[in-house]
Structures are given as C-alpha cells and as structure tokens.
Image (spheres, rainbow, N blue to C red):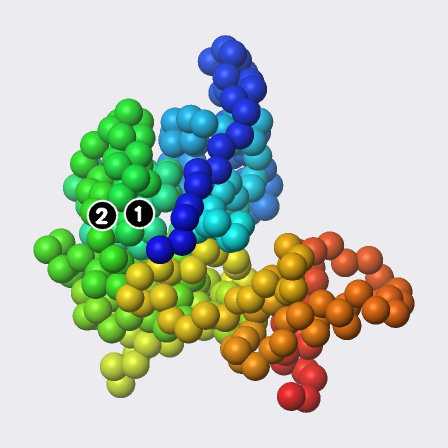
Amino acid sequence: MAQTKGCRSVNVGRGMDSSQIERLHAQLVEHLRQDNLLDNASVDAAFSAVPRHLFLPNFSLEQVYADEAIALKVGASGEVLSSSSQPTMMAIMLQQASLQAGMNVLEIGTASGYNAAIMKHIVGQNGRVTSLEIDHDLAQEAENHLVDAGFPDVRVVNIDAVTGYAPRAQYDRIVSTVGVWDVPATWIAQLKSNGRLVVPIWLDGVQVSATFIRQADGSYLSVDNRPCAFVYLQGLGAGPNVRKQVGSTSLMILSDEIGTIDTVSLHLLLSDDLEIHRLGKSLTPTQFWYGFQIYLMLNEPD
C-alpha cells in the first residue's frame, strides 16, 4: 500500500469574526449565482445555509471560500487521493441530479462531508443521504464534521464504494464525486427505475460528469455531459491505470494505452529542441483542457 500524507495549510485567517466569515461565505454564494448555477431555489438555499469552513477546519478561510477544490489527502508520489470538490462543480452536478425534497440519495466519495450536507439540506428532513468513503480516517472526520454542522442523520459508511450500499437502497439519485472507468453494476442495481445517476466518467483522456437515465429498452443514456476533473475511484472498481509520471518530472500523462508509452523518452523529447508556436489566441488551462483538447479528440483523425 502506498504511503499517504495529509494535505494541510497554514491556519491564517481563523481569527476573523463572524461577520467576516459571513462576508466570505456570501461572496462565494454570489459568485455561483452570477454564473447561473443556483437557479434552483433549494440549491441556492443549501449553499447559503451550509458554511464550508465547518468541513475544512485545517485550511485558511480565504482558501475555504475560494471557488476551488482543496486536496485533503495525497499519495507518496504527489497524486491527489481525496479532495473537497470545487463549489462550482458541486453546483453543476446538483443541477444534473435535480434533487427533490424527500429523496433517498447515495453519494460515492464523502471526502470532507460538505457535499453530503448540501444534499441533505436539499432533500430535507424526510429525505435520506448515505455517503460512502473508502478511507477510514476521512470517513471518521467527515462524520464529525457533519455532526458539528448539524447534520447528524447523514449516514457515512466506511466501505469500498464499488459495492454500493444495499441496506438503504433503492435510491432516487446516486451522485459520485470520484471518477470511474465504468459504472459498477451494483450502482445500477441499487437505483430506482426512474432514478438518475450522476457520475464523472473517463472518456479517452478527459472526464465528463454524465447524467445517466434509464431508457425504455433498459439501457442507460446520458445526454447531459459536463467536463470535469475528479480523483479516481479506489478499491476493486478502480479500473485500469491510465496515468504515468513523465520521467522524473512532476508532469503526469493520461492515456488509455499508458503501458505502451515510454515516458523517459517522452521527457527527453519534450526537453530537446524546444520551440514555441503560438495559436494566435491565448488559452487558459481550463479552456485548453475542456475545450481545445476535446475539439481535437472529436475532429482530428486517429
């Protein structure tokens, strides 16, 4: 088993008074509103009511209320094993899930517990949220966070999520906050026939958050697919390895055929005779990853 280490930041800003914390929280919520991600009143109310800092006590308030993912645990080689999802991505997936009051929801990947709390607020007192976490320490910490934040009835289960959780099935919604190579059959079996499965799935170098809905012939189809980047499912359902370090650098390459790539030679190639070619338009990393790369995948020959 690879050694892991926690990922913590300096706790600056924790001396802020409640009004400063409320201001940072309100700024994050308003940011999500400006991006039209809180058009559902129940989702807006959940993000407004649930403070993120209660689930991330070891991070600065400025970092907690920035619209960014926060690594909670990293492996020995630096790969992120668990993170608190970016609030924007959380809101996008909640749009896809279309949660309603009273629903029975299964979450794959508890992490800090923040997303589970948001979902519990949406489904309300008569709804149920069960969250599965493979890491024992994270599961215990998340359970403590949920109790402290006023959500003691969210069920956190320390288990390999590939099995789902049959004792509380059938589920109206299954929401995965970890990327998968393929959807485990157990998740489908535990989903109601009119249910919805929202899951980040691997597609030839990128992930998309897919919204699978049962069709008349029994198959599951997603026509709502949003670019995303999540840590990968661990355990028995992890799928094949698609990542490899490039030489001795911090770069990682992702490929369906990673075993055929000589990353040492690739490192030498990238380091030799460097030339800069400009596209004529500046691209942010996000635009490149979720726009230009996908365009090339769809339009260029193999």
Callout 2: few (<14), some (14-19), or many (20+) C-alpha neighbours within 10 Å?
A: some
Which amino acid lies under the numbered mark 2 shown in the image of this protein?
Asn
Q: Position of residue 64 (x, y in %)?
A: 51, 31
Q: Quadrant of the C terminus?
A: bottom right
Q: Is residue 40 visible?
A: no
Q: Position of residue 84 (x, y in %)?
A: 44, 42
**Secondary-structure class at tag 1:** loop
Residue furthest toward the bottom? 301
Q: Quadrant of the N terminus?
A: bottom left
Q: CA distance from mark 1 to mark 2?
A: 7 Å
Q: Identify which residue is drawn at 59% across, 63% down.
A: 245
Which image quarter: residue 183? bottom left
Residue at mark 2: 158
Q: Position of residue 91 (x, y in %)?
A: 46, 47
Q: Between residues 159 and 113, which one lies in front from this camera angle?
A: 159
Up the image or down, 155 lies above or below 275; here it is above
Numbered label tally: 2
In the rendered structure, which disc, 1 or 2, sits on the residue that comes first in sequence?
1
Callouts 1 and 2 close, C-beta under 8 Å = yes
**Secondary-structure class at tag 2:** strand
Which amino acid lies under the numbered mark 1 shown in the image of this protein?
Asp
Q: Between residues 104 and 281, which one lies in front from this camera angle?
A: 281
Q: Is residue 223 visible?
A: yes
Q: Identify which residue is drawn at 83% across, 69% down.
A: 272
Q: Identify which residue is drawn at 26% across, 63% down.
A: 162
Residue at mark 1: 135
292 on left or right of 74: right
Callout 1: few (<14), some (14-19), or many (20+) C-alpha neighbours within 10 Å?
A: some
165 on left or right of 181: left
